[in-house]
Amino acid sequence: MNNKTLVIGLFMTGLILIMALFGPHFPGVDADLEQTIVLKTGEGKLFPPPYEPSGDFLIGSDRKGVDLLSRIVIGTRETLLTIAGIVLVRTIVSLSLGIASFYTRAGAVLLRIWEAVFSFMPTIIFVVLLLAIPPIMFSPHRLVLSALIIALAETGRLAEYIRSKMVELSNETYMEAAVANGGSIPGMFRRYYSPMIGRELTGIAAREAGRVMFLLAQLAVIGVFINQAFMSQETRGTFAAVETSDAWPVLLLDLQKDLRVAQWIPISAMAFITFSIIGFQLLADGLEKRRADRIANRA
């Protein structure tokens, strides 16, 4: 296969998928994520977590004394499920909006309004502002609401991409001939547009997965997590954010503090996050190249 980009992308995303499916059974992985409260050295000294990389902790531990590699491996499944849910919602809404905007004036107007509302500021700022609204921030359904906000924030961009692909296809000579021969809208959609959209979906899903992972990492860097819960501190009259998941971005919760005393925690988290983003991007590029090669060969 000459498509090295696709091969590398499949390999990288395949590794992540294997971790998600079989990670808890890997040798050396603590599926129970047991906490080591105190470590005792040979000299009798006691050390609290986090523990730096050693023979006991290959890439170190987190602040609770949990083996960091085990936590990352175990958290892979939750991370992928979160990304998959966001991508699924975004794709379904974008397909509906993109197709509607191609066929109807009302759909086109709705798409323009959608883009105007969601694109007048950077996505990350828009998401942060919405997640900071108290009813959303303290909602028991925060995870679902946060995922919906992230999914819908870039729906207009993806819907416009789908619409543009349909417009591009409609300008082909054979499509004009099909219209001239009396092709119906449902028939032409089923015969021409639907297969084209289907071929685009795998690449769209891979590229959007990379974009979502990147956005989740950006949010984590500034201390915003969709998996967070807030507990009341009665003595102070304030609320404190607590971890409620093992998803990779949550490891950046104490980023500023960890950069001073436990650099291995954010470095390890960002290494896996970066690996996944690159893998998704290469997979999307490889699939796009494969489609282009097939079209060129048919021509």
Image (tube, helix red, strand yellow):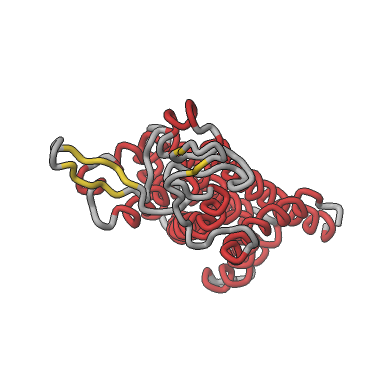
The image shows residue 88, relative to residue 243, as above or below, that is below
Residue 80 % position (x, y): 52, 57
Which quarter of the rendering shows the C terminus? bottom right
Kindly give the residue lying farthest to the front in the view shown.
43
Q: Report whether 165 appears left or right of 296.
A: left
Residue 211 % position (x, y): 53, 45
Q: Residue at x 57, y 73 (%)?
A: 187
Instruction: Examine the image and state in which quarter residue 86 appears.
Output: bottom left
Q: Residue at x 52, y 60 (%)?
A: 77
Kindly give the residue lying farthest to the top in the view shown.
260
Residue 58 % position (x, y): 62, 46
Can see residue 5? yes
> 133 or 14, which is in the foreground?
14
Instruction: Examine the image and state in which quarter residue 129 appears.
Output: top left
> 3 or 24, which is in the foreground?
24
> 298 or 261, which is in the foreground?
261
Number of numbered tags placed on the structure image: 0
> 147 or 232, which is in the foreground?
232
Instruction: Examine the image and state in which quarter residue 179 appears.
Output: bottom right
Can see residue 250? no
Q: Residue at x 15, y 35 (%)?
A: 236
Which quarter of the rendering shows the N terminus? bottom right
Residue 145 % position (x, y): 31, 54
Q: Residue at x 61, y 56 (%)?
A: 170
